[in-house]
Amino acid sequence: MGGEGCRIRLVEFDFDQKQERELPVDQVAVAVAAGRFVWIDVQAGADQAVRDALQQIGLISEAVIDEALSGEALTRHARYDDYLHVVVTGCRPSGARVELERVDIVIGERFLATIHRNPVLFLEAVRQDYHSDFLRFAKSPSFLVYELWDHLIENYLQVQQEMEERVEAMQRELAFGKVDDDVFARFSSLGSDLLHFRKVLLPARAVLTELSTRKSIFIGEATQGFLGNMVGTVEHLLQDLMVDRDILSESLSLYMSMVGHRTNRTMKRLTLVSVVFLPLTFLVGIYGMNFSNIPELNWEYGYLFFWVVTFLLVSVILVLMRRSKIF
């Protein structure tokens, strides 16, 4: 339901009977007042349509609605008397780039609202999987909080795996020298993505730690234990991310060392040629001068003498360079 591009899905849960059903907007407040739990999922279209729908439900303040519709994709959380407001950032791989997807989660005692501008990858996974988990495991409304974070962490793991594959591909490319002029641009882009993803994970870890350790009527203690385990997963993700950055940096350093080594070998060969031909150039310069009184000019053996001197000079230079281990 909804209007002007706004889509709202309202689901009521009965944890005793293990039943769920969709509600119309005007029944949400009644269901919450009756002690039942409702999931409010809003895909925002026109701002005014979203405001009208959420104001009709009447569970979320105007300030939180404004924040949800105008804020940036940065993970954080805030506490209110009647609910928690948590902003999480999902990731959607798009070729060699990663698009950030903001989701505002409002966690109340009898409702949970998810507000987002566009379809969100990890929310789509939640909608596909939550039904079976609800029937088998759910005992309290906190199960939806667990489902959201579980699929969000899974989303992070997928992104990290794809970035790791990009790092390995770049490493192979650099190791075998199969590079082009764009290698530094691609290296910079990948390094920027790794750093940007780290900036997503760090606040996610802080918010998850806060939710798992600070007691609240909105999140059950059993769910907090599971959230605490997810903190360890995020820690491992951060460590793997730093390892990927180190591998990428070391691969580039190795490639630059290989390029420098090849350049040095080339310069060594050029230096050898220059050293050999420098005295020969000197001789040619002398005998190429247009002076009529050059002693060897009319000498019968002058040409042979020139080549003997040339051979001796080259031989002496090569022997000296060989002894000096220049080549």
Image: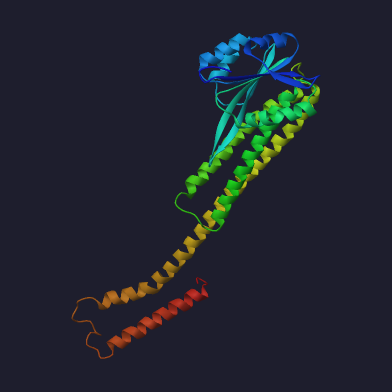
**Along the viewing direction, whichever of 199 and 272 lies nearer the viewer:** 199
Considering the image in quadrants, where does the N terminus appear?
top right
Residue 17 position, x and y percent, is 80, 19
Asked if residue 107 shows in the view, the reply is no
Asked if residue 321 shows in the view, the reply is yes
**Along the viewing direction, whichever of 305 and 146 lies nearer the viewer:** 146
State left or right for residue 9 relative to residue 263.
right
Q: Residue at x 67, y 42 (%)?
A: 240
**Along the viewing direction, whichever of 300 and 204 lies nearer the viewer:** 204
Quarter of the image where one finds residue 314: bottom left
**Along the viewing direction, whichever of 21 and 255 lies nearer the viewer:** 21
Residue 199 position, x and y percent, is 60, 33
Q: Residue at x 58, y 19 (%)?
A: 68
State left or right for residue 28 relative to residue 271.
right
Q: Residue at x 61, y 35 (%)?
A: 198
Count of marks overlaid on the render: 0
- Is residue 65 placed above or below 123 in the rendered structure? above
Residue 138 position, x and y percent, is 78, 25
Quarter of the image where one finds residue 226: top right
- Is residue 46 placed above or below 181 in the rendered structure? above
- Is residue 129 placed above or below 26 in the rendered structure? below
Residue 49 position, x and y percent, is 53, 14
Quarter of the image where one finds residue 140: top right
**Residue at the bottom extreme?**
300
- Is residue 27 placed above or below 264 in the rendered structure? above
**Residue at the left extreme?**
292
State left or right for residue 75 relative to residue 97.
right
